[in-house]
Image (spheres, rainbow, N blue to C red):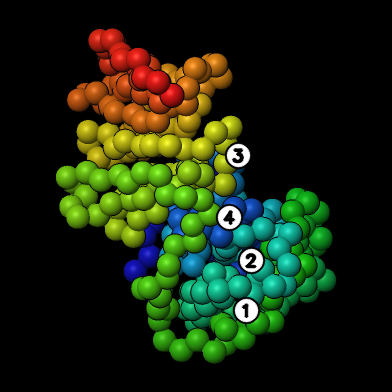
Amino acid sequence: MDIPFVQARYYTPTAKRAIDLIVIHDMEYPERLDAAEAVAQFFARGGSQASAHYCVDADSIVNCVHDHDVAWHAPGANHHGIGIEHAGYARQTAAEWADDYSEKMLTISAALCAELCLKYGLPHAFVDASGLLKGYRGFTTHWEVSKAWHQSDHSDPGPNFPMQHYLDLVRGTVGPAVIPQEVRPVVNAPIVAILSHPSWGMAYAEVGADGGIFGEKSPFFGSAGGTPLNSPIVDGAVTPSGQGYWLVAADGGVFNYGDAGFHGSMGGTALAAPVMGMTPTPTGQGYWLVGKDGGVFSFGDASYEGSVEAKV
């Protein structure tokens, strides 16, 4: 299976180690088609001193730490476990773990685990806290690891995670994992902008009002999806290199990803009218924001050349 690799910042390199467990986690991140990529980028940036071997959502898997290295995901089981993060929350109900998104995600994850079990000789069996202390091998959760070694208090993936169904999927998988090719994006807010760049060819990314980024073939550098916003996103722009982008909110807040630099914003400033759009300078070292009333705000190497007065 061809899985993209994005190296997490925090991990412990090893030449070789025994692998006895697959530890199931949830991301505490929304069920989005960019969830695996977003959390992988979070690990890469070192957003917290944590990592996992794999991140899985409903249409993709991202490898963040090589199997032979130690990921920082479940203290007590780190040195002999493989951690797998799944989109969703520990608070999810049984029905929410059984929706279409989750079923696709668990099917992909189970196919990955079927390969891991074959590779490392792991049984398709659940191991609770008492079994962990006895050295049993198989599948467990972060919650069981927390109860066994008391080195963390995480309770993911929650009491309603369908472990038996998941193990049945692992047992029933034959051959390499196949990721569905036609999974429609889960859009939680209206689409407000589209991003493209010559280096992306015919690919493009759609931008949601909640800051979500959706694009099957466009590069992903991060998103504001799942982040509480003071105002909805209204526009975005790609850097001259095509290796990053900005998002701008109605209150003038600016969010930067990839090689997009932050040069200032109107966030926290009282505006006469909401911001409606943004344009970067040719160098990418600045940008202009424009308000609904025609007001122009310049940042970085963007010069101010005046504005028009519009009736709003």
Residue 166 at x, y percent in the picture: 62, 79
Amino acid at the residue labelled 3: Pro
**Left of 2 or right of it: where is 74?**
right
The reply to whether discs 2 and 1 touch (Cβ–Cβ < 8 Å) is yes
Does label 2 or label 3 sit earlier along the sequence?
2
> Which element carries disc 2, helix, strand or loop?
strand
Q: Nearer the viewer, mark 3 or mark 1?
A: 3
Where, quadrant-wise, is the C terminus in this rendering?
top left
- Determine which of the numbered discs, if any, sits on residue 166 in the image: 1
User: Which residue appears at 31% of the width and 36% of the height?
Assistant: 237
Residue 10 at x, y percent in the picture: 53, 44
Residue 135 at x, y percent in the picture: 73, 72
Does label 4 or label 1 sit earlier along the sequence?
4
**Left of 210 or right of it: where is 81?**
right
Residue that badge 3 annotates: 228
The reply to whether discs 2 and 3 touch (Cβ–Cβ < 8 Å) is no
Distance of label 2 from label 1 (alpha carbons): 10 Å
Does label 3 or label 1 sit earlier along the sequence?
1
Q: Residues within 10 Å of mark 3 (few under 14, many from 20)?
A: few
Query: 165 or 123: which is nearer to us?
Result: 165
